[in-house]
Image (cartoon, coloured by chain):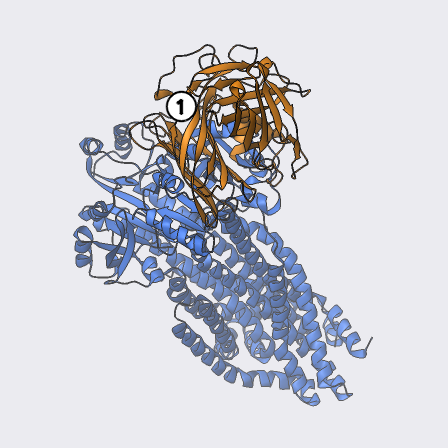
Amino acid sequence: MSLLAVSSRRYLLAHRWQFGLSIIGVALGVAVVVSVDLANDSAQRAFELSRDAVTGRTTHQIVGGPGGVPEAIYTRLRTSVGMRRVAPVVEGFVVLPGGDPGDAEVRRPLRLLGVDPFSEAPFRARLQTGPAQIDLGAFLSASNAVLMSRATAQDIGVGVGETFEVDAGARRRLILVAGLIDATGSDSDALADLLVADVATAQRLLGTAGTLSRIDLIFDETVAGGELLDRVRAALPDSVRLVGAEGRTETMRQMTRAFRVNLTALSLLALVCGVFLVYNTMSFSIVQRRQMIGTMRAIGVTRREIFGLLITEAVAIGVAGTVLGAILGIGIGRLLVSLVTQTINDLYFVVSVRELAVAPSSLLKGLLLGVGGSVVAALSPALEATGAPPRAVLMRSEVEARARRRSVPAAVLGVVLLLVGALILALSGHNLVFSFAALFVTILGFALMTPAAVVVAMRAAAYPMSWFLGPLGRIAARGVTASLSRTAVAIAALTIAISVTLGVGIMIDSFRGTVIRWLDSVLVADLYVVPLGRVPFTLEAATRAQLLEIPGVQRINTVRSADLPTADGGRVQLMVFDLDARGEAGFSFASGDPEAALTAFRAGDAVLVSEPYAYRHAVGVGASIELLTDRGPRAFAVAGVYYNYASEEGLVAMSRTTYERHWDDRAISGFSVYLDADADLAATAEEIRRALGDRDVDIQSNRVLRQAALEVFDRTFLITGVLRLLVTLVAVIGVFSALLALQLERAREVGVLRALGLTPAEVWRLNGAQCGLMGLVSGVLALPVGLALAAVMIFVINRRSFGWSLEMEIAPGILAQALVLALLAALVAGVYPSYRMSRTRPAVALREE
Amino acid sequence: MRPRAYLLVALAASAACAPAPEAPPAARLQITDVLGGIGAAGLERALEPREFSFPADHGPHPTFASEWWYLTGNLQTAAGRSFGYQVTFFRTSLGAPPLPRTDDSAPGIDGSAWATNQVWMAHFAVADIGPGRFFAFDRFQRGALGLAGATAFPWHVWLDDWSLEQDGSGSFPLRLRARERLEAGGDAGDEVAVDLLISPLKDMVLQGDRGLSQKGPTPGNASFYYSFTRLQTSGTMRIGDQRFAVEGTSWLDREWSTSALPDGQVGWDWFGLQLSDGTELLFYQLREADGSPSAHSGGTLVLADGSSSRLDAADVELTVEHTWISPIDATVYPSGWRLSIPARGVELRIEPLIENQELDLTFRYWEGAVSVAGVGLDGTLVSGRGYVELTGYAEGGQPR
């Protein structure tokens, strides 16, 4: 073994805690990145598999508006057009009841796919696997028979021939298991939580008799296939669209993209903190070994060899950390995947992820980031160590003097980076990846400004500290500056970590505050009535009159939510409102003159679009959008852009009058009820229930609805909160490790002080004061940095991800929290070194070098 | 009697025991399996002769388990090119009684037009005699939503875009249309199609005892059965990019029943022959497991004037003169017969126009155009064309 390697090994062993901690730092960072990547991938994969299970070899789909696709079209395609590879699909959700009705958290949605066994063969291979276990006679003739994968049946706890309850449509139904589909591996995943039924059964369960969700078709990519496609198109009424099957999957993929990018970026922040830790450890190890390195250089070891040694050490840390991190990441990923799935279910669509898929690509990403990050972090200290002449390396004072000198150009570079970050933000348009890149540049800029800030802060702290603690206070303050090469990195790491925590915290608070204010402005009615299972229904004039006769009921506003297919195979959600002035006041406009917008909305063929819709589709007031009416596609003018935080995809709002002009659908999805001020909520709700007869409805007060909305909000941000916590954890470990090393290295200095008569208690005080000071400086520096990060996240990242405008909201509590956190992290980190130093006899401490 | 009722039963058995070789693993979500559930619970049986009423009886009889509209014919172009064709619509009631409804749903609110216990199957085959090509296809559909079904007024039987329907205000002429892409399951490319107008040259014949055709010793093991044994047929035949104007004669069988193949029987050989002297001969021979003919075999002789007489198993002698080996799995089919009715002096040689007219479908059997020559009634020399059906020979075509 070469002399170099031996020295490296001896050093690493002697400082195993220091290196161990930086390995843990990298491991945690990598773990967070890997776990988020795995969770994202698993959710995405589950989504694609389940899409594949229900789409199969379909090349095109016929989709319709609010009424779905009239089933007569299917007959026409089969008989008059004579198309063979065409299959009807009825798709919807039923819910496994669990706990209280209305408690979405414990109710598990199952996808119900209604297919026609007579036309299935060319389409969905995944439904046709496994040995014969299917009573197809029962499947066709029983009104409630379904098939499911063996795994799903085991999950639900039912067997063939057994029944179980679900909430379907507005009713609770008994479902019969007519057979099991034996599937393994990805097939089983694809069929997770999927119930397959005959079209008739699905229509009955979902209450959609007469209509299909869509018609699947397979066209060959040949001239004849093209001609057939034209013939099919010609046979279709204007109220439906023929679209490519890929379009829908693609839109759904796009939908969650922003969400996934945000999670990934947040996970990268954890890694940045981890890399900071490596940087800290490496710079530290070089400072500690300056004498050894100087000696080696003096006896002829080349710069290249020293550089190689240091980089090898960094790689070792990186590899060890990454391996540990990958293992840890898979573990954390298992936890995260359920959170990611929950959020996707709340915000986008129902997806069921049975287990974490460990993709090699995710692990590779982790390896590259972990090892690469470690090497990059080690580059600068390694260059530093090998760049200086041997004598200079030997001189500690030279190192610190240079660190202080360099704090100014570093700060200047930091400012430049901030400007670059701002420039990227300004120029990157809607690009989310660039936006995050700008965020990272900004963070780096702030980090570079830290040393200068520390020098200034310590100079300012010296006087109050001496007033407070006497000479010890001044020593503590000056000490921080005196070992700036090490303290600055530790303080920067802590600052970044705390500011990220603070920034994310402020972002969530602001988001939540905005949503609460919005809910308060929108939820102005007293009671909200929706049918169980969200099945649209018609409110006959007589029933409506009856409702209005209930004492205390002033007004009824209805809403209809309908999905319309777009030309590219996507969907747009249309909200149809029948509002009075009070209901209209619920609209507050991001752009467009409110008065003019509402006038156009009421009477003209105009729509209002929600902010995310306007953002995603780049439409503003004055533009027009095409919607598929029952009389074919038609353009509607955009009269205003309104604030809405309910849908991430965006909404199009239309008045009932306009809607009924263009659509035959007369159903509503629910209605709100305004009551007299002194009306009894519970009693009125009971009256309403009675007036609606056998229609099962959910009646909620605005307070309960608001609460439920916030619960969903909190649930969707749970994963953000978890990531924020993980980032903080990495940072605290980083700071702990940095301060530990710093204080241990100061043992000799303290030995001198002890020899000069400093008592152990005074050592405690000195160390405490110094750690406290560093923590405090980090905390104080983290405030503006955190605010800046929050601002970028709120005003740039969030807008670019979702199109929402949020009001920044800074609770004093969260700022105090950041300060306390920084202080605590620093103080805790100082405990062990203080303990050791106070216990060490001065003579031993002095002898140590 | 033409015991094709068994076809459906056999179909069910075949789907359960021996899927077609190219079919995916056994439990596909495909309708071929559904037909396994045929039972007689709650269904009507053919117990005694009934009063037929037309055109009502041209339509469906859903209270019986199975029913078919069976058309076969021999056609020629003006230039003498010959074709055989077969189009059959099978209806079956899923005997599986509906499971007790476990929900409280009121019908009407959530009733679905897709719900049905009527399942339809159709076969379409064309024999292009000259080049010796044979094409056969099958389709399945539910008897709901207008996808497949039958009506008597107007007379209309259809499955997807295959249809047999009256072309005017009366039951005849019938227009028969069927087409299928050569590429299995395809929607584009070369296709085989027929578009024919069909009118009777003779009145219908009630088979068996006034239309009640007994199939086994058990009462009710019988069908209602009538035939149009000579139908004038003209129209077009399309094979790939070739289109032919064709003319010839067809044979239509109508039968409905709720019965099963008696124990011990393995299949049948059915002959429907149209002779040049204006007579038609129907004969079927049920085969016992040991290969011997069943005593319930029989047939009908229809004279030129439309009058008919029954033939018993003992009246007819059938000798196999040649065999043909299926290239699919070396199943041996009879392929050339001598049929004689000694009491009437009839002695006929029957030969397939193409040897390979095996329908390799979900249910496998041989059904093909044949030529006839020999001595007819009163010792005159006759020739003719006809159709022969052979079941229970191949794996996957084995009746229970």
Helix, strand or loop at mark 1: loop
Q: Quadrant of residue A24?
A: bottom right
- Comparing B13 with A164, the one in front is B13
- Comparing B283 with A512, the one in front is B283
- Comparing A204 with A117, the one in front is A117
Residue at 50% in and 33% down: A146
User: Can you give x and y, in whole percent of width and height, for residue B38 in the image?
Assistant: 52, 23
The chain displayed blue equals A
Give the side of residue A477 with respect to residue B146, left or right.
right
- Comparing B18 with A46, the one in front is B18
User: Can you give x and y, in whole percent of width and height, for residue B302 in the image?
Assistant: 47, 19
Disc count in the image?
A: 1
Give the side of residue B9 with respect to residue A385, left or right.
left
Q: Residues within 10 Å of mark 1 (few under 14, many from 20)?
A: some
Q: Amino acid at mark 1?
A: Lys
Q: Quadrant of residue B263?
A: top right
Quadrant occupied by the C terminus of chain A? bottom right
- Give the vertical position of B172 relative to A645 (above or below): above
Residue at 77% in and 72% down: A10
Indicate the colour of chain B: orange
User: Can you give x and y, in whole percent of width and height, for residue A744 in the image?
Assistant: 67, 70
User: Can you give x and y, in whole percent of width and height, for residue A305 in the image?
Assistant: 73, 82
- Give the vertical position of A425 relative to B95 (above or below): below
Tell me if I can see residue A191 in this picture.
no
Quadrant occupied by the N terminus of chain A? bottom right
Residue lying farthest to the right in this orientation: A1
Mark 1 falls within which chain? B
**Residue highlighted by disc 1:** B202
